[in-house]
Amino acid sequence: MSYTVSQVASLASVSVRTLHHYDETGLLTPSKRSEAGYRLYNDSDLERLQQVLFFRELGFALDVIAGLMKEPGFDRESALLMQRELLSERASQLHAMIQAIDTALDAQQKGLTMSKEDMFEVFGEFDPAEHEAEVKERWGDSDAYAESTRRTKRYTKQDWLRIKEEGALVVEGLAARMDAGAGTDDTEVQRLVEEHRLQIDRNFYPCSKEMHANLGRMYVADPRFAKTYDDVRPGLAQFLCDAIQINAE
Amino acid sequence: MSYTVSQVASLASVSVRTLHHYDETGLLTPSKRSEAGYRLYNDSDLERLQQVLFFRELGFALDVIAGLMKEPGFDRESALLMQRELLSERASQLHAMIQAIDTALDAQQKGLTMSKEDMFEVFGEFDPAEHEAEVKERWGDSDAYAESTRRTKRYTKQDWLRIKEEGALVVEGLAARMDAGAGTDDTEVQRLVEEHRLQIDRNFYPCSKEMHANLGRMYVADPRFAKTYDDVRPGLAQFLCDAIQINAE
DNA sequence: CGTAGACCCTAACGTAACGTGAGGGTCAAG
DNA sequence: CTTGACCCTCACGTTACGTTAGGGTCTACG
């Protein structure tokens, strides 16, 4: 059974142009063309489209989605599990926003003014404080998070610059090796990954190899983290994650 | 107390460029400028920004947001109530997506294939069938929705074309009057609005003036409906809604 | 007092993810 | 054999900003 563009379009509530676009960029190329050049999608094409749409809903950029899906380790099941987790995170974010509105309404009726921080807290997309519970859950009962905030409080702007520089160097190096076609077990890649761990250990909190592995998994599971790496080079987050797992063994 | 761009930016987790952009387009103009031309935001500017960000989160286009907020009837409280409703609608949509993932995972593990419709159902943004419960709630206990689906089932493609044409004529006319600066109580506007009601009455379901008023409110409360009108002319959804309320009196 | 570094401005081009025609084949029904 | 619904490939338009470029402003420090 195969479907034409308009059939797929109405099935998935996307425009025909969107399908053309995904074909042009290689994100979703239909498995067949008819004699006349018509795009023909089969069942597995549709499955792939579903994946793409879930990721898109979650706010991933299209090139990042492409990167994720061409990873050798990619399979439908783990992708669905990851999407499930991210969706429920998003749902709780929405709930926080609803609560913020309730607070605002309450303040409005009582004639009070909300603190500026409270007014905008729910819009922050990368404020660790908001996701404290989640982060702790991910990191187990360790005190890494507390330790991190304790240490970082005393850092000056110069410290931040230095830390950022150090980090950029490692990331740059990894991207370069990736460009060169190196695998995740490449010697230089492994050196850089270990350097990555030590940087965290020095600058933020004691970071064992095990915790580093956990962190790596988070880099790909959480689009906010993934973005920082994938912005440098699409697919870098996954690459780093895989390399970390090897280093951790 | 006033805030500079970067202060507001970090408070609300938006970029400085975004604030510039909102200023350029008139969506959020800071109430003051310093001697040197620096933008200075006060408390009510921040409240306005909060509103904008909520609407943005809900998927409204910026010009639509601007249109909403410059309406004479606009106030913070009703806006917050509306945003609350839309957010919880969005939240339940997310829950549906999570359930869809669970179904997909289940099918995957059992080696079954999901029906194509089920695979993509959650992505539809304007499928009335999905929002049946909600729509019914809005429309009271009336059978309007059932009647509508019953009638429309028998329509041929030609019928749809005719109905679309009729509708476009009214919408076009309203947009033209709006361009001409006519108020919502303008004679021609009122004639068109009544024609709008009669079209629904003829083509979809018995539509009293009261129900029409309800419908009008939905046009602005629901971005999926609002878009159909605001795409023709920004602010048209609100204009139509107001005109309908007058016609209904 | 002057100068470095963090901020601010306007202006203007770049980008992502499509939307929207233009111009032209394809195909099933009548 | 034609008409209307679909399909194709360009190719330029749009939204909501991102990103330099070029140049003032402000404050702390030597």
Image (cartoon, coloured by chain):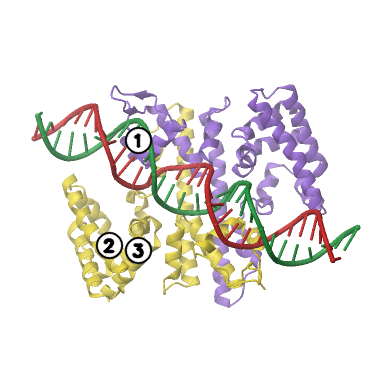
Chain colours: A purple, B yellow, C red, D green
Q: Name the residue beneath numbered marker 2.
A: B142
Q: Amino acid at mark 2?
A: Ser
Direction from residue B121 to residue A159 in the image, left or right:
right
Q: Within the image, what quadrant is residue A85 found in?
A: top right
Q: Is residue D14 above or below residue A11?
A: below
Q: Secondary structure at mark 1?
A: helix
Please tell me how crowded label 3 is: few (under 14), some (14-19), or many (20+) other residues with Cα within 10 Å: many
Direction from residue B106 to residue A165 in the image, left or right:
right
User: Could you tell me residue A244's position as x and y percent?
Assistant: 71, 30
Q: Within the image, what quadrant is residue C11 found in?
A: bottom right
Pointer 3 indicates a residue of which chain? B
Q: Amino acid at mark 3?
A: Ala
Q: Secondary structure at mark 3?
A: helix
- In contact (CB < 8 Å): disc 2 and disc 1: no
Measure how far apart labels 2 and 1 are at the Cα level: 35 Å
Q: Which residue is at the front of the view, A68 or B213? A: A68
Q: Which residue is at the front of the view, A236 or A12? A: A236
- Let me know if marks 3 and 2 both belong to one chain: yes
Measure how far apart labels 3 and 1 are at the Cα level: 30 Å
Q: Amino acid at mark 1?
A: Val
Q: Name the residue beneath numbered marker 1.
A: A8
Q: Name the residue beneath numbered marker 3.
A: B237
Residue visible at 77% across and 39% down in the picture: A166
Residue visible at 45% across and 64% down in the picture: B66
Residue visible at 42% across and 61% down in the picture: B64
User: Could you tell me residue A66's position as x and y percent?
Assistant: 52, 33
Q: Is residue B235 visible?
A: yes
Q: Secondary structure at mark 2?
A: loop
Pointer 1 indicates a residue of which chain? A
